[in-house]
Image (spheres, helix red, strand yellow):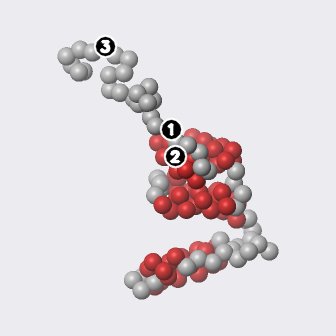
Amino acid sequence: MAEKIVQKAGRNQLGEFAPMFAHLNDDVLFGEVWNEETIDVKIKCIITVVSLMASGITDSSLTYHLQNAKAHGVSREEIAAIITHATMYVGWPKGWAVFRLAKEVWNEEIPELTDKDRCTRNSGRKKTSMNT
């Protein structure tokens, strides 16, 4: 049996304000669902990352779940393939956003965009008085 996952973020951040939500987060989601053994934790991490990606969630919660995926054995090559595959179904901009976060988590340098990378309104067109 794997080490039991224990979560206290719900109670720590919302315990007094929203005790039912804190209970559901800490005891049900993490206490029961994340500890259920039919699917291993690595697969749950992947499912969670893709679910957040599909929802367009690219805030600290996705960063946390990317870190969690890395901690549970998802390699750099695997996360790149997962994000690429999911991008085909959830959308190109979401893929780009998640890749930027994943590169940070897997400690890869994120290069700055160059003028060649940027799409410009007049790219490839002759300038005229109508499109200047």
- Residue in view at x 73 percent, y 65 percent: 40
Secondary element under disc 1, as helix, strand or loop, is loop
**As shown in the figure, which amino acid type bears the numbered disc 1?**
Pro
Question: Which of the labelled discs sits on residue 126, or is there none?
Answer: 3
Say which of 104 and 44 sits in front.
Answer: 104
Where is residue 113 drawn, in percent x and y? 44, 34
Say which of 132 and 112 sits in front.
Answer: 112
Question: Which of the labelled discs sits on residue 100, or is there none?
Answer: 2
Can residue 55 be seen in this snapshot? yes
- Residue in view at x 23 percent, y 14 percent: 128
Give me the C-alpha separation between circle 2 and circle 1. Answer: 10 Å
- N-term-proximal mark, 2 vs 3: 2
Q: Which residue is mark 1?
A: 111
How many marks the image carries: the answer is 3
**As shown in the figure, which amino acid type bears the numbered disc 2?**
Arg
Question: Image quadrant for the N terminus?
Answer: bottom right
